[in-house]
Image (spheres, grey):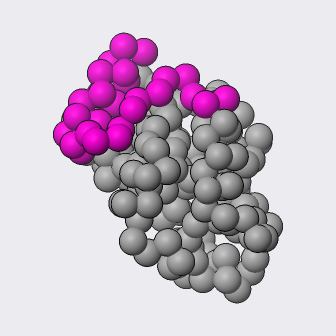
Amino acid sequence: MKNVVLIGMPGCGKSTCGVLAAKALCLDFKDTDLLIQQNEGMPLQSVINQKGNKYFALAEENAVRNTCFENAVVATGGSVVYSDKAMAYLKENGVVIYLRISLKTMLQRISNMSTRGILLRNGESIEEMFSERQSLYEKYADFVIDCDEKEIEDTVLNIVRVASEI
């Protein structure tokens, strides 16, 4: 089976649903945010605060490109779509599923926006980030799963269904 790569906004369920989908599909689970934290020895927000956005983006790209994903569900960081190289690597090695949520849902689900490790470009608002990333997610997605007003179990079942069809 190909790798199953989950992309989407912060709070869409990539990590939560990814680990459950991996269990259901009998695949490994990888979370690129955790890989960055392990590589850097600090939380994501600390990487952004101490080393800057450009460094964080490169760390994210390296976490993707320097990790061998085999028979895995891969939960990516929300900003991975800013890297053409990282996305090309992920698409070469798996099927990319966009877990789509609305801005309203994202804001409802994310209570710790300032400490979560969300990459915002200088002066960029959450709304601007959402709009820009949404078009990138759609560009790279092989499949789209709508996750607004869905239970975790429904999203996991949809991921498993898509993965089983490839």
Give the x, y percent position of residue 63: 63, 57
Front-lying residue, 33 or 68 = 33
Looking at the image, residue 98 lies above or below residue 42: above
Give the x, y percent position of residue 128: 68, 55
Looking at the image, residue 122 lies above or below residue 129: below
**Residue drawn where x is 60% and y is 82% of the image:** 46
Give the x, y percent position of residue 41: 56, 80
Apparent side of residue 165 relative to residue 69 in the rendered image (left or right): left
**Residue drawn where x is 42% and y is 15% of the image:** 166
Apparent side of residue 159 relative to residue 89 in the rendered image (left or right): left
**Residue drawn where x is 36% and y is 60% of the image:** 109
Tell whether position 9 is magenta. no
Tell whether position 164 is magenta. yes
Front-lying residue, 143 or 122 = 122
**Can residue 56 be seen at all in this image of the molecule?**
yes
- Identify the image quadrant of residue 127: bottom right
State which quarter of the image contains the N terminus: top left
**Residue drawn where x is 30% and y is 21% of the image:** 161
Looking at the image, residue 161 lies above or below residue 89: above
Give the x, y percent position of residue 123: 76, 71
Apparent side of residue 36 relative to residue 61 in the rendered image (left or right): left
Front-lying residue, 18 or 70 = 18
The magenta-colored residue range is 138-166
